[in-house]
Each structure stands twice: as C-alpha cells, then as structure tokens.
Image (spheres, rainbow, N blue to C red):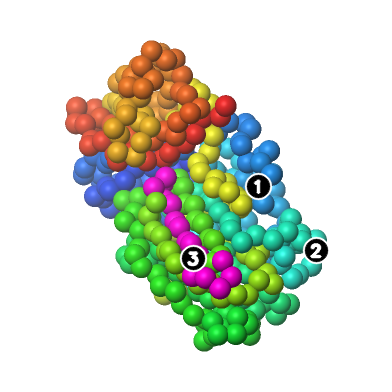
Amino acid sequence: MTKYNSLSGFILVLGIMFNSCCETDSKPGAPEKNIKSLDVPRIDFIIMSEIQSHQNDPNVIWYDDFNNGEKKYLESTGGIDTAESFGGSGGAMRAGFKKGETVGEGNRKLAFGDFPGPGESVVKQGEKFDEIYWRIYVKHEYGWQGTPAKMSRATSIVSGNWQQAMILHVWSGKDNSLTLDPASGIDGQSSTVKTTKYNDFDNLTWLGNKPSSEFQISSTGESGYWILVEARAKLNTPGKSDGLARLWIDGRLEAERENLNFRGSYIDHGINAVFLESYWNSGSIKTQGRWYDNFIVSAKPIGPVACPPNPTLYKTPYQGPEDLSAWEVELATDYEGDDIVYKSKELGKKESVVINMSNGSFCGSLNGMSDLSSENTYFCRVRQKSTNGEWSDWSRWHQNFNVAE
C-alpha cells in the first residue's frame, strides 16, 4: 500500500481538528478547504517519559513502540510509518485501507506462553496465562469515514493446525463503535476442543456482543488524534461460568461481559496469542490511513502512557474560519472534570504547551504545586479561538495520561 501523503501525515502528527463542515480534496491527507465553522480541538498526543513503567514490569509479556524497526512476530505485514507516532517521533504501524479494500495494510500476530508453534516466534515460552490485558493507541486519518470491521483479538491456539479453545474479539459494533465479541471453541459437555481449524465459525459458540461502546471511535468527529484502547480477557475457572471481558476506550470502561464460559473444564492451554488486524468486511469507502502504536500485552492492567511532571501537550492543528488566534487547555484528575487541577493562560498560535506555572496555574487538589503529581491520572480538555474572536466549545475530557515517578 502506498504511503499516505507523508508531508500531510507529519502535519497530522501535530494534531488535527474535528467535526468540520467543509469540502475536501479527494487525496488522503490533503488540507481541508472552505472551512465554514470552528472545530472543537483535541489533544493529539503528549510527549512520553523516556522510561515507561512497562519496561521494568515482570508482568509485561510484550511491548512494541514501532520506533526501532520491526520486532519478530509470528506473522507481520504492513510497514512502519515514520511520519506518524504517538509522541511525535519514531513510528507507528500502518493499518489503513485503499478504496474498496477488505484486507487492510497492517497485521501483527503475537504468540506467547504455551502457544504450540516454533519456539523462535514465541515469547515467554512455556508460561501459562489465564488472564491478559492488551493495549494500543489508535489514530484514524482526519476526515475518516466508515466503520472497519476488526481491530484485534486475543485467543487460545491449542494445536499445530490452529484449533482455537477461545477468542475475544475487539470488533466494530453498531455504527462507529467498538464491541467485545467473545467465543468458545470448547464442547460444553465433554470440555474437549470442537474447532478443527482457525476461525472455525461453524464450531464456535458465540457468547454475546452487546452492548457496544458509547464512544464512536471510527466516526469522522473522533478522527485525527490518538485514542487509547485497552482490553481484558480472563478465562473462567474450570467448570464455572465466571470468565470476564472488558474494553476501555480513552480511559473509560465502555463494554463489559461477565459470567462467561470460555473453556468449560478445559485446562491444557491458556490465552497465548494477540493479533492486531485490519479487516473491513464490506470494503473501505475510500482510501484512508489508520495507525496503531504503543502495543503492550500484560498479565496485569496497563493504562495510559507515562509523562513527565511538566508534560508537553500537542493540540490538533487548527481547522476553522480565518486563522488560529489563541487556545486554552485544562487538566483534571477525573473523566467528568470534577477536580480541575490546571488551567492554562490564553495561549498563542503555537499548538503545543508545557504544563507549568509560566503557562498557567495549578488549582484544585494541586493548588500551590508547580508540577503534576504521580499519584493521579490526568485528563485533558481544550478549546480554541479564531482571529475573528470566536471561541469553540470545550472538548470533552480525553487523552488520559499518568506521570512517571
């Protein structure tokens, strides 16, 4: 697949706006024209701390930031785009589509633990995992349209011909949402594997895929900035229906399945593979880019990236009438903004800011402080003003992050 307009891709790394009423070039990534309204901005990304907590965490099974070339996967297709990356440097996995394409550009298949395959492609070989979490940051090209079918899955592969004991799919739900679609490949009476191959849909028992997320991740309005997606899969206790599946988007629990019977009393294999995917069953309605970054698989909860106590935030580039005159950002310790801890001054045209006393003031539970505390998770909201004096609405609280200790 050809690279998506690398110059525009670089500009998009510095962020993009939302909900514009405009006419666009047909070329992906081309500048928007004839903007008629002032968009509500987002925080596209935050500069990460050099050391992330997962780097020294024994619970972490895998990490790939796509910054230092290709890591060894069981299967890998699609390249790394160095014009896109959460954090503004390095790269990201391409996961976009050409018009009409059902199989997109990017695919990574990670094998671990008790996966029954070649040892050189299996990490943490020989270990057994009954519960895992996996996390990626996802970005859809500004102006994205349509609902791609599949994003990722965790599964239990139990033989050389890839029979599956269970699967937890992170797939698109209604409209532009995401949902969890768990399935079992175990006969409930005998607790034997009844699938005969990979994706043996005729022999899978589907455990329910409702409700979908409220967050419309593939909507045009949520395109152009990095969004955190984390999922959890927990196998049931053998003989009980107490399995779990959970999905968080942008720091908020969006979908949950409880009382799942993934495996009956089958215990020969645990969860041993996570796949990042790009499938669109009906085909993409246009050529458009999507990217994945900061991929982690862990036996424990993962959460967002860690940032310095005085982090640098990058706003999505201005889209609206006239030109950017100013913007403001606030931080809170909760998704509802009940504890606002930082309010910036009216910032100028530069679309990045360091969170410090020179650029604003600390308040709420951080009143009197000069930097952010490592005890909290922080959420951002932002608004902007055009040169004709019009302010946009505030964005919702989004782009959560932690502070490195």
Q: Nearer the viewer, mark 3 or mark 2?
A: 3
Answer with left or right where residue 105 lies relative to residue 385: right
x, y percent for residue 147: 38, 64
Badge 3: residue crowd in 10 Å (few <14, some 14–19, many ≥20): some
N-terminal of the pair, mark 3 or mark 1, is: 1
Q: Nearer the viewer, mark 3 or mark 1?
A: 3
The answer to whether residue 104 is above or below residue 338 is below
CB atoms of marks 3 and 1 within 8 Å: no
* Residue type, numbered disc 3: Asp
**In terms of secondary structure, where does tag 1 sit?**
loop
Residue bearing the label numbered 1 = 59
The verdict on residue 246 being magenta is yes
* Residue type, numbered disc 1: Asn
Image point 42% across, 45% down: which residue?
251
Residue bearing the label numbered 2 = 119
Badge 2: residue crowd in 10 Å (few <14, some 14–19, many ≥20): some
**In terms of secondary structure, where does tag 3 sit?**
loop
x, y percent for residue 273: 64, 64
x, y percent for residue 117: 76, 70
Answer with left or right where residue 170 lies relative to residue 192: left
N-terminal of the pair, mark 3 or mark 2, is: 2
**In terms of secondary structure, where does tag 2 sit?**
helix
Image point 30% across, 38% down: which residue?
336
* Residue type, numbered disc 2: Gly
Return the residue nearer the eye: 92 or 287. Answer: 92
Q: Which residues are magenta?
A: 237-252
The verdict on residue 43 being magenta is no
Residue bearing the label numbered 3 = 242
